[in-house]
Amino acid sequence: MEDLYRNPHWLSLGGRIILFNCKQTSVANDRATSELVFRSFSYDREENSLAKACEGSAVISRKTPARVVKCECAADSRSRVTTPCVLVTKTCSKRGTFQYTLFTLNTSNQLEPCIDFKLPYKLKEQVSILQGPTVLWSHEDSVFYTSLQTGGVKQIPLQLTHTIISELPLQKAQILVLGQQRSSDQCSEKQIRSQTLGYTIEDGQVFDGTVVLPHPYICITQSILVLSVDCVDSVLKCAVVAATSRRQLVYFEDAAVKDTCELPFEQPECIQVVHTGRNGCLYAIFFHQGHVCTVWKETFQIASSWSGVSSVHVDDFLGCGTDQMLLFFTDQSKVGQPLEKFLITDLCGISYSRGQDTEAEKTPAPTSENYLLTLQALESRLQSGMTILQELQEELRVKERVLQQAVQTLTDMASDRETAVTQHEQEGLFALWESDDESKNEDSDDKMHDAPPAPSKPRIDKLWHRLTADQLVVGVTLNSDSSESLASVSLSILTEMMGQDSAPAVIQTQSQVFHLPSSSSSSSSSSSSSSAFAFPEPAAKRSRHHNASGPGDLNTRRLAVTAATELTPLLNSACVKCSVMLHYTQRQDALALASSSPPAVLFCGQIDLDIHNDFQTQLLKSPELNTDEVREDLLSLLAVLDLWVFHINSPEYSLGDINGWIQERAGFRKIEASPQYLLSNSSGPSAAMVLHWHQITPFQADLSIHSSKLQMLQFLDSLLARLPASCTIRPVRGVGGQGAARTFALALEKELESLREGVASMLCEESAEEARGHEERPETGTAEGLQRCREAWQQHSERSRKRLSPLVDAGRYRRLIQSVSKAQLDGDLAALLDNQRTPLGSFTADVNYF
């Protein structure tokens, strides 16, 4: 029986541990016989060891070797008693088929064959033995099952992916198969609208699977345990615990997240409940690499964890009326002796170990404090500290300006000069006295006319959000007056934990900025791409073109700021409300210090998350509509889809008919809210594809593709089949094109105009003063006239020297430097956009004029 301990299969029932395995025995004529052997053990408290209770065997095959596939305890429908079940397989010599037999161990400790079936393929590890007994497995995205009642192998009439198998603890237990619908060809209209389906084996009913598990969790759930089920008005009300691939244990009630716990290990395999009596309940989770952790049901926090575990079992091994956990540990030094190192504990005072140290936990248990909550609290404190620091820095700048003005005032008083003092309102101060001299206030206002006005806060036109694919997109539309004064802008999302008093936490987002037409401007869209930054044309250029208002003018634009983040972490944290914050900086004068324009934060509002909403947006349903809602849907789609930009060069073939070919291609329709974009006919946001064709010349064009990588490759393959062999398609880093080059040229022209006009104005004023200085021409006939002529020549020489190094008024020179510096900054920014053809900061360049 030593072969029993080589890679054994374990299960527990009635306080006993039962080991199953297959062994080969030699008989007459050198023929090998395959046998299924078992041995049961019970715990001896006095000896602190597992003592043998009984053993037995059954012959499986006399020709071919056999092996154990799966062993589980399941309720037998004939005796209504939970029975150990073992699934054994052997290879048939004919046609390479596999023979499977399910054995049950009866109360007389006899192995009895229960179910026999053949398959043309080998079963993988995803095999379940549930009540009946019923054997279920998955093969090629299909679920098969067999039992005593079916009399053969059957297939469920649904094509499901990411299959989850469990039991519904109803009055008459039901076997549940849950998964995502793969094909809707043979399903009813009601089933087509549901992306998550559930199927019960006993009655063959199909229902909406989101009443058990929300749709976003189907793909990431690896193990599930249904705690309770109640049918109210033909609707299931379930309490479910699920272990996900994101290292989280999630508790659901009526398909809503109620609590989460971060798990210390990855790849969970099964979840068991440990009833410890008055001390409460535990969830025991077994992981793939031999790790085990327990979570308290009441507090939903980690209780303890172990590593190097070969198997874990939950039963009343001590006969005390409550459950304990029995953990077997692997010991490489004692191969073939799996029962020499184990631990029996309920984490509530009961602990028996053998071959273990007094400290049973090999992996230090995490503290009772949840790391996620601690991290969120630290992030909130950091954000609060940054806000306080910004306020202190602003107060320090005000104090420095007041001190400088005080020193200047004292210096002017000592020199008998008048001093222009700023109003206390401009410095954000409160006056401690009331001034009765109104004339002084008026004079002070006249003298401080050069002081820049205080920047105003951006005005929010609308706050909206969309659930696109598996991401949440939040958008804010700013007023056109506010857009002109902003230098940079982005969004952040703060989450609020339901039922907890912790501070809001900042989640990771990706912000983008799009240009929209002003509500007062024309709604016609431009046919060419426009960059995220554009500069108004100089006066000379505008006088020649006679079109001051255009896509390059920021005065005719609004800003739409979006922030995209993954939806799953929000649902895992049981968050239903999110606060949206706008981060921005104001444009300053060219000579202003960088610290004079600190980043500011503006509260935009709150949004409520509801995953039960329809994921089909108005854009995907009716792209022919021209509404603000469709524009918001398009912005949300562009924010989550990947972007590829290609430059097409066709020296021998005109590209004029490619746009028409794209529109005639199956499934592509024009988006009326932004006609330069084409949308593919898709069933959902994850399958959507947005195209933008920009014709540069008859033989050159830019193609922007917003889609997944596979869809992009498929479309390029069909496009290459349409284009001649002489065409070349080259990927580029962004879209700037002639629009970015034109913007760069306008910025350079404006810089030259500012420099020329400023210098000319100063030199003209100096020339006027010189002209007034030498109106009289001295006579050269006398000695006095000759002396005056010599003085006039010296003055002319001095004026010539000054023209080479002129001395100008400080105020006029400051205004010139401000104008030129601002134009140079705009030119540098336009040059960067033209060189990289990619956005700067959080702004996006690949967005047309909507």
Image (spheres, rainbow, N blue to C red):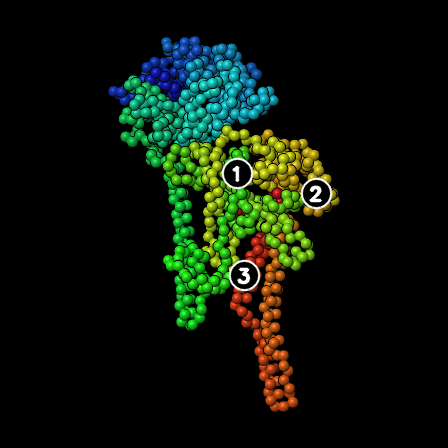
Q: Position of residue 249 (x, y in %)?
A: 41, 30
For marks 3 and 1, the one nearer the N-term is 1
The quarter of the picture where residue 357 lies is top left
Q: Nearer the viewer, residue 350 or 771?
A: 771
Name which residue lies at 59% across and 76% down.
799
- Cα distance in 3D space between marks 3 and 1: 39 Å
Disc 2 packing (10 Å; few <14; some 14–19; many ≥20): some
* Residue at (44% x, 22% y) in the render: 237
- Where is mark 2, residue-wise? 727
Residue 228 in the image, given as x and y percentages of width and height: 41, 21
Mark 2–mark 1 distance (CA, rounded to whole Å): 43 Å
The disc placed on residue 464 is: 1
Q: Which tag, 2 or 1, sits closer to the chain's start?
A: 1
Residue 779 point in image, percent of width and height: 64, 86
Q: Looking at the image, is mark 3 or mark 1 nearer the viewer?
A: 1
Amino acid type, mark 3: Gln
Label whose residue precedes the other's in the sequence (2 or 3): 2
Q: Is residue 528 above or below residue 364?
A: below
Would residue 233 be seen by someone viewing this image from the given angle?
yes
The image position of residue 571, as x and y in percent, is 46, 32
> As shown in the figure, which amino acid type bears the numbered disc 2?
Cys
Quadrant of the rendering where the N terminus is positioned: top left
| Residue 486 located left or right of residue 290 | right
Q: Secondary structure at mark 1?
A: strand
Q: Secondary structure at mark 2?
A: loop
Q: Which residue is mark 3?
A: 818
Quadrant where the C terminus sits is top right
**In the picture, residue 686 is in which quadrant?**
top right
Which residue is at the front of the view, 780 or 803? 780
Q: Where 652 falls versus 125 (above or below)?
A: below
Calculate the distance from the C-alpha at mark 2 to the C-alpha at mark 3. Answer: 49 Å
352 on left or right of 694: left
